[in-house]
Image: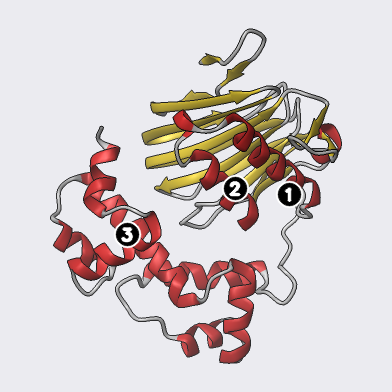
């Protein structure tokens, strides 16, 4: 197990990796909060041991590869929960201290995982009076859930961890903790968001979109596929994913483009066409809008 010394009394134990190569680790610490970003890859099957002695939030920041799967040991029963359809970016797990949790994957070209650990029993917002009971916030484990608020906070936290202001970072972590406290999806539960698609409907549609990246979105086909009118389908899809079908497919195309760029065997023009974009300029524009950097800059950063 790799241990990051983050202070005189605090160390962050990174998840044990079996079958994966850790490429990079960035870490940050302030008071009773520690955070790290692990970047890893694997050419075969791998397992991450997410079990921890302190409550943690795990966020998948970036993932290129086959879907991840989480298994948790609840009492005497072992069960697989939280199977994620690609792209799995943004999946959030809240793991209480002592819960046996494993993440499984294979053929992963890139996985960036944020780890936020809370060492105190109670957390107070910096400069304020509001206090959160950490154990209570993590009383119900949550695995591979969708939480746009935590994802947005995670991006702010990891934008530049080496230059992150400590008070600002602590405030972001406190906001993540309050978001976990208010979350509703628990281990073993698969709930459709209010007004959204049922899990089987969402799975069928996202699989269709992923398999037809180079085709234009056919809303009528997808609506018929899950037995809904076009109008209700569009509304329900956005309620479930936070994105309209067209935007979701563009994100999936960018994820495919990243996968192809990591192979290093294609030009950007070829990557654009294989990912479903009209040309390199279209791909570069969509990529920069989503990632805040050009495809070349992203590609260079992965090989740095």
Seen in the picture, residue 255 relative to 64 is either above or below; the reply is below
Q: Which residue is drawn at 63% across and 24% down?
A: 30
Asked if labels 3 and 1 touch by Cβ distance under 8 angstroms, the answer is no
Quarter of the view holding residue 111: top left
What is the CA distance from the residue labelled 2 to the residue labelled 1?
A: 10 Å
**Image location (x, y in percent) of residue 117:** 66, 29
* 29 up-or-down from 131: above or below: above
Badge 3 marks a residue whose secondary structure is: helix
Camera-side residue of 256 and 126: 126
Question: Mark 1 Cα within 10 Å, few/some/many (few <14, many 20+)?
Answer: some
Q: Which of 43 and 175 is in front in this view?
A: 175
Q: Position of residue 38 (x, y in %)?
A: 47, 31
Residue under pointer 1:
179
* Residue at 44% in and 46% down: 62
Q: How crowded is mark 3: few (under 14 residues within 10 Å), some or many (20 or more)?
A: some
Name the N-terminal-most of marks 2 and 1. Answer: 2
Q: Tag 1, which secondary structure?
A: helix
Residue topped by disc 2: 153
Q: Do the numbered discs 3 and 2 sit on residues whose CB atoms are within 8 Å?
A: no
Look at the picture and state if 152 lies above or below 165. Answer: below
> Residue 99, image x and y in percent?
74, 30
Q: Do the residues labelled 2 and 1 touch (CB within 8 Å)?
A: yes
Query: Between 186 and 301, which is closer to the camera in this rendering?
Result: 301
Numbered mark located on residue 288 in the image: 3
Of pointers 3 and 2, the one earlier in the residue sequence: 2
């Amino acid at each position: 197990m790799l241990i990051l010394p983050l202070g005189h009394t605090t160390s962050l134990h990174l998840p044990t990796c079996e079958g994966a190569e850790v490429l990079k680790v960035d870490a940050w610490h302030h008071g009773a909060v520690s955070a790290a970003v692990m970047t890893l890859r694997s050419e075969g099957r791998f397992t991450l041991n997410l079990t921890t002695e302190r409550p943690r939030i795990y966020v998948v920041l970036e993932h290129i590869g086959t879907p991840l799967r989480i298994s948790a040991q609840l009492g005497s029963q072992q069960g697989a929960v939280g199977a994620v359809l690609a792209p799995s970016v943004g999946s959030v797990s809240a793991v209480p201290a002592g819960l046996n949790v494993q993440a499984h994957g294979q053929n992963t070209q890139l996985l960036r995982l944020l780890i936020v650990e809370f060492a105190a029993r109670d957390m107070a917002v910096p400069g304020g009076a509001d206090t959160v009971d950490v154990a209570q916030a993590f009383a119900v484990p949550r695995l591979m859930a969708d939480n746009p608020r935590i994802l947005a906070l995670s991006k702010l936290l990891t934008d530049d961890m080496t230059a992150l202001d400590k008070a600002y970072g602590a405030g972001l972590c406190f906001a993540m903790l309050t978001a976990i406290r208010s979350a509703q999806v628990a281990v073993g539960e698969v709930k459709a968001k209010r007004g959204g698609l049922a899990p089987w409907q969402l799975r069928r549609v996202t699989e269709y979109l992923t398999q037809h990246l180079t085709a234009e979105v056919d809303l009528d086909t997808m609506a018929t596929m899950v037995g809904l009118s076009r109008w209700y389908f569009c509304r329900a899809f956005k309620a479930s994913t936070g994105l309209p079908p067209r935007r979701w497919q563009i994100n999936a195309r960018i994820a495919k483009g990243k996968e192809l760029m990591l192979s290093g065997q294609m030009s950007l023009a070829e990557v654009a066409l294989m990912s479903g974009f009209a040309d390199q300029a279209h791909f570069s524009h969509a990529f920069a809008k989503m990632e805040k950097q050009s495809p070349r800059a992203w590609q260079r950063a992965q090989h740095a």
